[in-house]
Image (cartoon, coloured by chain):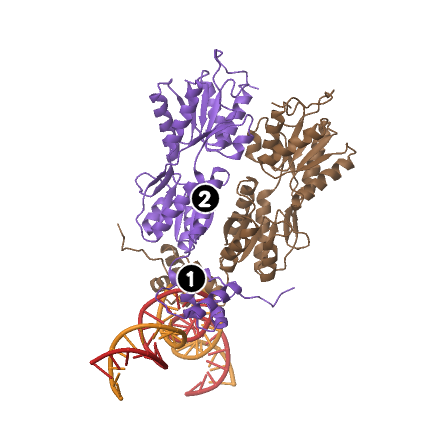
Chain colours: A purple, B brown, C red, D orange
Amino acid sequence: MADSSRPRRTRLADVARAAGTSPPIASRILNRDPSLSVSAELRARVVQVAKELGYRPHAGARSLRLAGTGALGLLLPSFLNPVYTYIVRGAFQRAAERDYTVLLAEDVGEKQADETFARLVAAGRIDGLLVASAYPGHPLTTMLAERGVPHVFMNRGVPGSGRNVVLDEERAAAVAVDHLASLGHRRLAHVAGPAEIEPAARRAEGFRARVAELGLDEPIVVEADFLETGGSQGMTRILERDGRVTAVYTSTASQAAGALNAAWRRGIVVPGDVSLVASGDMPLADALVPPVTTVRMPFAELGAVAVDALIDQIEGADPVDVTITSAPEVVVRESAAAPRLTPSDDPRRVAR
Amino acid sequence: MADSSRPRRTRLADVARAAGTSPPIASRILNRDPSLSVSAELRARVVQVAKELGYRPHAGARSLRLAGTGALGLLLPSFLNPVYTYIVRGAFQRAAERDYTVLLAEDVGEKQADETFARLVAAGRIDGLLVASAYPGHPLTTMLAERGVPHVFMNRGVPGSGRNVVLDEERAAAVAVDHLASLGHRRLAHVAGPAEIEPAARRAEGFRARVAELGLDEPIVVEADFLETGGSQGMTRILERDGRVTAVYTSTASQAAGALNAAWRRGIVVPGDVSLVASGDMPLADALVPPVTTVRMPFAELGAVAVDALIDQIEGADPVDVTITSAPEVVVRESAAAPRLTPSDDPRRVAR
DNA sequence: CGCGCTTGTGAAATCGATTACCTAGCGGTA
DNA sequence: TACCGCTAGGTAATCGATTTCACAAGCGCG
């Protein structure tokens, strides 16, 4: 079954020949060169033929000539966190609108940073990089700056880089606190992300600030990773530290799942004993038991705006910081309710 | 801040010059051309210099000359289903080992199939495609075959294509049924995927076959999508159809989350009233309430083997069908237990 | 001493698209 | 009529890596 019939790709020369002209003219027509003057018929014929033959310029040849690939890299910290799904979709869509292709990669750690860099940047596969996996001291940060590669830090900013596209985490945290306070909660806790992750710090700060503004009790803030295990550990530590906490704010829906699990293990009922609100809405939140109230964040917009910022940069604009300010919005479900009027002294129960 | 100091990429010519030879020789040394005979010193010098300068061949130039890009496309049905995380990781890793780069894309539907095809295949960005989003009548199937593009259908096979790399869903289903039967369940149900999705059909068939073999009661099988909402709908329909079901087998962990939610809404306790087992293990299963017993599937291996199959195909081998037979293994958690000795007539409760 | 081989090396051609530069023909004008 | 300036289009060079092929030097052998 070794097919000798390699249906070779359509080349520009094929289009030109079929349209009765030369490759350069075809190229300039297809690329809408305004300084070209040709008859309307020829123009139409070339466009027509190109479509019929399904012509697409060879990306390699193009990148060789143009010193640009029409592709952007997008580096995620972990494919496992579903929030990135929305960021990625927003990025893909906006990139497609602006005629770019997005190449997705998972940041597999410092040790392989060289490898990642080599594969994408040094090999000239991309024109710029969207970095969603930044943290202080990440080797990639230096490499990109040194080589003058256009890049944007998205979701996780790098202070002082002047190229951060991030969400308004402070405001989202404030909205969550407001919601809980309006239900009557005064003793709150927050399962934050690792302190060195920039948005985690902003979220925690926004949380503390709003709690102070409203004059609520001194809050508890614990650090944990962003996935299920982190939520579980965080919730456990909160319950161990202060049994009188009546509401918990987690950083992600995945953390909320872990938090619910940890509460359940200790016999603590949500929202009866403790209310729960998570940052970032997604279908998972609606499927948990009980369904989790969330603060919806404009993830898709984040992806789209980051792509815009990067493409602008590639096209010569100076890097800029952008904070997406679309209003975070509370999606009310069943995990947050008014606290017990007469709270038991200590809602901690025997561990299962 | 417009930097005029574009630190241009290192080219082969730079390496050659620095090593005191010509580009062709440097190229042949770096590519280990066996028909080349040069002094060991020159060889060492070139390799050394290339490393020092961080030389990486320009992917575009290379693909132009070699008619091959060193990149594979991987088309997923939805970034939202976390099972793909493991498949993708397995694929990325194996691809890196074999010196290929993987480009990830989400299959956004028939209408955009042309667009996807154009972006990746027609633009010559990839040498072959891993399709995890196949279903009967998918336009991509035809396009790929017509153009003679190397491709593999992974996870979701296309019957008769002769290029399917899939898991042993029948066995996994049998293992799940065995586990439930060993706990004493006789009346089982299955939340299957959409009937037209090939692995869903195999899973359902394996389920039915094993139930019959063991002489259990006639099972209930309902169709639903693979995410949370599907699990919720599926569970609801099962409970409505037959209140005497004591155990449910779902197709994914996401479905399990939805199923737990639906059960909870009706006041049905898991595993007290109904036991639950999900196909495919992942951290989410451990965080649900209660933690869900799963059948672990070798997802990473699936990704790796599919990559191997595709690269082999690119290198001239004929396509092959592969079924990964690594034993599926039950991960026992708390969602499956022995049925009530004296089941209530109908465990359906008042909807909340 | 010279033929024919083996080694070692580099010049030139190639992949496909783009672009700087050039030519041919035309009408109009001094 | 000779020349200018425009239109419509083509020729050749270019991007970087690879590969074919020709060439030169050195060696053994007759």
Chain on which label 1 sits: A
Q: Quadrant of the C terminus of chain A?
A: top right
Image coords of residue B173 (percent x, y): 69, 38
Q: Amino acid at mark 2?
A: Gly
Image coords of residue B338 (percent x, y): 70, 25
What is the number of callouts on the image?
Answer: 2
In the rendered image, the vertical position of residue A56 relative to residue B101, given as above or below: below
Q: Which residue is mark 2?
A: A90
Chain on which label 2 sits: A
| For residue A217, side relative to residue B75 (left or right) | left
Q: Which residue is mark 1?
A: A62
Q: Amino acid at mark 1?
A: Arg
Mark nearer the N terminus (2 vs 1): 1
Q: Residue furthest right?
A: B215
For image coordinates 50% across by 51% down, the residue present is: B103
In the rendered image, the vertical position of residue B236 relative to residue A349, given as above or below: below
